[in-house]
Structures are given as C-alpha cells and as structure tokens.
Amino acid sequence: MAWLSPLRELDASQRHTVFASFLGWTLDAFDFFLLVFVLGDIATDFQVHKTEVTLGILLTLAARPIGALLFGRLADRFGRRPVLMVDVLLFSILELACAFAPTLTVLLVLRFAFGIAMGGEWGIGASLALESVPVKSRGLVSGLLQSGYPCGYFLGAIAYWVVFDVLGLNWRAMFVVGVLPALLVLYLRSKVPESPVWKAGKAAGQRHNLLDSMQGHWKRLLYMMLLMMAFNMFSHGSQDMYPTFLKSQLHLGVGTVTVLTMLLNAGAIVGGLSFGAWSEKVGRRRGMIVAALLALPCIPLWTHGGSLVLLGLGAFLIQVMVQGAWGIVPTYLNELSPDEVRGTLPGFAYQLGNLLAASTATAQSWLADRSGGNYALVMASWMAVVAVLLAVLAWLGPEVRGARFGKSGS
C-alpha cells in the first residue's frame, strides 16, 4: 500500500527505534489497563465500592506529569535511550508489586508510583522515534506510535481472558503478568541508537536550562495542556469504564467483554494509522477536527446498539475516530516543541492534560451511580460534549506540519 511507503524507506536503525518506541507505549498501556479489567474483582476482594477502586486510575493519571517532567528533563540532559530503559524497568517492577498489595490503600499508593514511571515513557519514546525519522514519515510514525496505546488495551483484554477464563486465576495474577515489559530493556540496549537530534545538540553545546529554553513558549505550553486535557477526556471517557459498562449494565460474560474490547482496540489501531498518515496531506489540525466530529454519529451505536453486532460495530467505529485524532498527537506536540526541551515538553504537556482529566473514570462512575447505574447515558453524553470541545481547541491552535528538528532539518 502506497501510504505505508514512508515506513519501507526507513533504514534498519530507524525501524528498530520506531518499533521499540511503539512497544514501549504498548506495554506501558498494557500495564495501565490491567487495572481497568479487574475494578470489580478488587472491590469485592477488599470489600469496597468500585468507585473507590477507580481512584487507582485517577492517581495513576494524576502522577504522570511528575514522571513526564522528571524523566523528560533527564532525557534532555542524558539522552533519550538510557532514560527510557530505566523508565520501562521501573514501571514494570511497580506493576508487579501491585500483585502483592495487602490493602486497597497500599494498592493506591503503588498505582500513584506506577503513574510517575508511566508518565515518563510517552514523551521520551515519541521524541526518540520522531527525531530519528525523515520529515515525510512523521505522520505515519506518529499514528503507529499512538496505536501502541490501543494495542496495549488489546493485549490487556487477552490477558484478562487467559487469566480469568482459561487459567481460572484472580486479579493478582493480572499484575504478575505486568512485569513482562521489563524485557523491552534488552531490545532497547541491543538494537536502538540514540536520537541524532539529541546527539547533535549535545555536540553543539545546546543549553538545557528549562526556564531559558521555554522563553517565549509558555502560551504554547498552556495551549498544549488544554488540548491534551480534552484529548484525555476523549480517550479515557471512551475506554476506562467500558468493561464495567459491559459487565455491570449489560451483564455480559468475560468472553464477550474480551471480544468487544478487542473490536474497540482494532478500530483504534486502524484509526491511529490512517489519520496519522492522512495528516501529512491535510494538516495536523484538520485531521484532528475531522476525527473528533466524526465520533459524534458513532456514539449511539457504541452505547445503545441493542445487539452484540451493533455494539461491536459501534465500539470499532468510535475508536477509529477517537484514536484517529490521537494518532496525530505525537507528531503535533513534537513539532510544537523546541529542540532543547523536546524530551520534556510534549510529555509534560500531555501529562498535565492527563492531570486535568484524571477524574474522568471516577466522575463517570459517580454519575452512573446517580442515574441508576446507567453507564450508557453517562458515557454517551460525556463523549458528545468532549468531541465538540476537542474540535474547537484544535481549530484554535497553530498548524506546524513539517517543522524542522535540529540543524539537519529532520
């Protein structure tokens, strides 16, 4: 297919870099979404309400800006590759620790710590990949990188089915599986080179003081943060409570929940790749706006389909649009960021937006409780409002397609 040609033109080291960055976000998301599938089981085990367990999601999202700033600054100073390896190892170990939490309080503390580690991965992985590929490849690579997120959700659904239906184990086994991303460190160490843009900046004595580097860019950070707030409300509003909606309101079994979740994430992968590539032709802003607005007619099928076939179609289509818009985000934020802080700024802005949207799952659970457990109504209303908000914010932003990275112009 012609639209995949930018990937075929990459050399071996560039392909390894893109693949490793994709795997990093895939496995990071995999570890995050394991909690989503077992909210009810944890609540039963600890004898608390599901809404209390959703605080684990809120705390993870709220902690991510800390990790984005901490690991991002380290990546701008010491390089993308070594810091990414440390980050992946850390979030894998913290995920494993969750399996042994004796109380809900301990589990929530561990999820907060996991959020710090998770917050560092996206920004470093995206800057490493996008600084390593040609300009014309950015859109498709961006979509591929962001597709790692639904791939992680997809793998989480498979793990949920295997652990519960096939092996008959409990929720703690899910977090034991979550240590597997640590193996990515071996691949990063053996196959992935350092970002050429970062190496050129270091050789030129590029300054790395955050305040100096951000002079004249504070308004841009504010815009990026608000845009990412809407994006995270869009994504988490469509995903985090979806398994709970299927089990609690529709009373579907583990196998059916797994299949519908896999359809949802298949749509997300299609959307991320197609809209990411399309943004090279139509521009970043236009691609995001179109995807956000096309989500609106998909909402009724997604929550009120009336049959498993229609629900599956709705789940697929809405994620084509949600993650289609998201597929443009990595390259858009990196093109908005100066070379000196590209390891920090995209991830920090992304995670600050996450912080503002961190209560999404808790708010949806709270609203559903007050509407008689009607998750469908709450989720549909939420998504309609956020889709319009996202389109407006994208329309107000700058268009920076093809911005130069480093002196080489890559």
Image: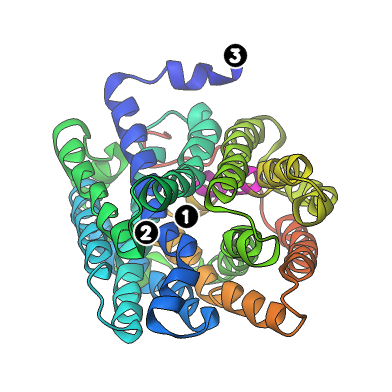
Q: Earlier in the sequence, mark 2 or mark 3?
A: 3
Which secondary structure lies at badge 1? loop
Position of residue 89 relative to residue 14, above or below, is: below
Q: Which mark is residue 68?
A: none
Q: Could you tell me the amino acid type at mark 3?
A: Ala
* Rendered location of residue 191, percent (x, y): 19, 31
Asked if residue 134 lies left or right of residue 197, the reply is right
From mark 2 to mark 3, how far is it between C-alphas?
A: 34 Å
According to the picture, the residue beneath numbered tag 2 turns out to be 341
* Rendered location of residue 33, percent (x, y): 45, 58
Q: Could you tell me the amino acid type at mark 1?
A: Ser
From mark 1 to mark 2, how far is it between C-alphas?
A: 7 Å
Asked if residue 201 lies left or right of residue 163, the reply is left
Which secondary structure lies at badge 3? helix
Chief secondary structure of the magenta portion: helix
Which is more toward the observer, 249 or 109? 249
According to the picture, the residue beneath numbered tag 3 turns out to be 2
From mark 1 to mark 3, how far is it between C-alphas?
A: 29 Å
Magenta region? 323-332
Q: Could you tell me the amino acid type at mark 2?
A: Val
Is 124 included in the stretch rendered in magenta?
A: no
Which is more toward the observer, 212 or 228? 228
Q: At 58% from the left edge and 59% from the top edge, which residue is drawn?
A: 243
Tell me whether circle 2 and circle 3 mark residues in contact (CB < 8 Å).
Answer: no
Q: Earlier in the sequence, mark 1 or mark 3?
A: 3
Residue 215 in view, yes or no: no
According to the picture, the residue beneath numbered tag 1 turns out to be 337
Tell me whether circle 1 and circle 2 mark residues in contact (CB < 8 Å).
Answer: yes
Q: Quadrant of the C terminus?
A: top left
